[in-house]
Image (cartoon, helix red, strand yellow):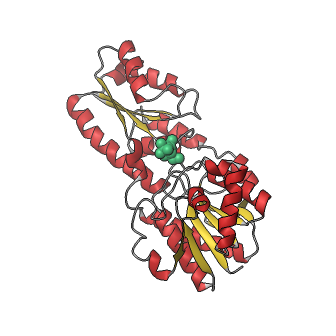
């Protein structure tokens, strides 16, 4: 192995730049050449591939987004698209890939390996924290701090106007972001896809006369919750409790931006460097994660199929602390 290609794929996440930097510098340290593939699989197909040296990743550790850009590629889902990508990879003499992304990106890399035999190491990059094989994903810590900062601000206005605020956070089909920011933000309720009893807990909160005397409330809802998003909930609750003053806020893509937190920079640096070690050890199709502070490899198959669960004890804690 002489030359590797690195790319970011799927939704961007703070810390992706720090991760590319670590990949590039560890590769060079070990005598490898590095190519950067722009826009993930799209760049593989359109041959948008650049040289990366030590200097090209200088001054990016603190920047959000991804300087390699990212995309969700439809073309790579076709056999023809993957063949064109392979021809381009070959032209550049790339022997192995490092993919920073989520499950969709791993699925593409697995298919690519099965058809063309190009080894790939996957690194978990998403704000959602929903990837199996790692305690935390790159971007998650920054995203929850961004969401928490917004909730603290909403709390000020909720308190002043004695209103109920429903705050919708991202997370796709998982409730990691919602549950953590609900606890950290002192929310009175949290709705996540993993907890089917959560709607009743929220209704209990409003039905309980003692609690109704509380002049304001913050309810956090995960975008993938079965009850629907913040706007739907605002309508539902307003019709059930016409005396309450209810407002909703959708935090949206603000959660994906910003300078990565120290934790995300360290996680990203560690994982980027470990991905090179994994390739040097001869790994071909694994994701690298950190579980209980130990570096672990998970086969792509298990990483894609595995389900990471939110903590039951945190669900209980959110309920206890919201009384
Ligand atoms: O996976 C990251 C994420 O931000 C999810 O939380 C969200 O559901 C989705 O991406 C939004 O995707 P897009 O930016 O393509 O609208």
**Residue 219 location, quadrant:** top left
Residue 113 placement, left or right of 156: right
Q: Quadrant of the C terminus?
A: top left
**Where 142 sits versus 97, above or below?**
above
Please tell me which residue is depicted at 57% across the width and 70% down the height of the picture. 272
* Rendered location of residue 213, percent (x, y): 30, 23
* Rendered location of residue 244, percent (x, y): 30, 19
Asked whether 13 or 293 is in front, the reply is: 13
Asked whether 107 or 213 is in front, the reply is: 107
Please tell me which residue is depicted at 38% across the width and 61% down the height of the picture. 259
Q: Quadrant of the N terminus?
A: bottom right
Asked whether 321 or 78 is in front, the reply is: 78
**Where 79 sits versus 159, above or below?**
below
Asked whether 71 or 271 is in front, the reply is: 71
Would residue 74 be seen by someone viewing this image from the given angle?
yes
Residue 33 placement, left or right of 245: right
């Amino acid at each position: 192995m002489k030359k590797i290609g690195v790319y970011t794929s799927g939704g961007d996440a703070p810390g992706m730049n720090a991760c590319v930097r670590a990949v590039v510098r560890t590769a060079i340290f070990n005598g490898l050449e590095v190519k950067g593939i722009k826009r993930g699989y799209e760049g593989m197909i359109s041959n948008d591939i650049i040289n990366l040296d030590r200097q090209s990743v200088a001054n990016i550790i603190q920047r959000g987004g991804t300087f390699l850009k990212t995309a969700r590629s439809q073309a790579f889902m076709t056999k023809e698209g993957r063949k064109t990508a392979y021809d381009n990879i070959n032209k550049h003499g790339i022997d192995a890939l490092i993919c920073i992304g989520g499950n969709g990106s791993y699925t593409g890399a697995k298919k690519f390996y099965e058809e063309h035999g190009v080894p790939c190491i996957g690194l978990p990059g998403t704000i959602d924290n929903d990837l199996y094989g790692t305690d935390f994903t790159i971007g998650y810590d920054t995203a929850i701090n961004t969401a928490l900062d917004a909730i603290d601000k909403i709390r000020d206005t909720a308190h002043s106007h004695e209103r109920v605020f429903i705050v919708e956070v991202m997370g796709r089909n998982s409730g990691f972001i919602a549950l953590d920011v609900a606890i950290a933000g002192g929310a009175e309720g949290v709705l996540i896809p993993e907890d089917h009893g959560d709607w009743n807990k929220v209704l209990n909160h409003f039905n309980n006369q003692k609690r109704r005397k509380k002049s304001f409330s913050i309810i956090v809802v995960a975008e993938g919750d079965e009850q629907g998003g913040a706007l739907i909930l605002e309508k539902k609750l307003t019709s059930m409790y016409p005396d309450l003053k209810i407002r909703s806020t959708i935090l949206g893509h603000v959660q994906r931006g910003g300078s990565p937190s120290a934790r995300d920079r360290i996680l990203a640096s560690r994982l980027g460097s470990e991905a090179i070690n994994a390739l040097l050890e001869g790994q071909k199709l694994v994701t690298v994660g950190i579980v209980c502070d130990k570096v672990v490899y998970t086969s792509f198959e298990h990483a894609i199929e595995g389900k990471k669960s939110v903590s039951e004890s945190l669900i209980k804690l959110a309920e206890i602390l919201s009384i």
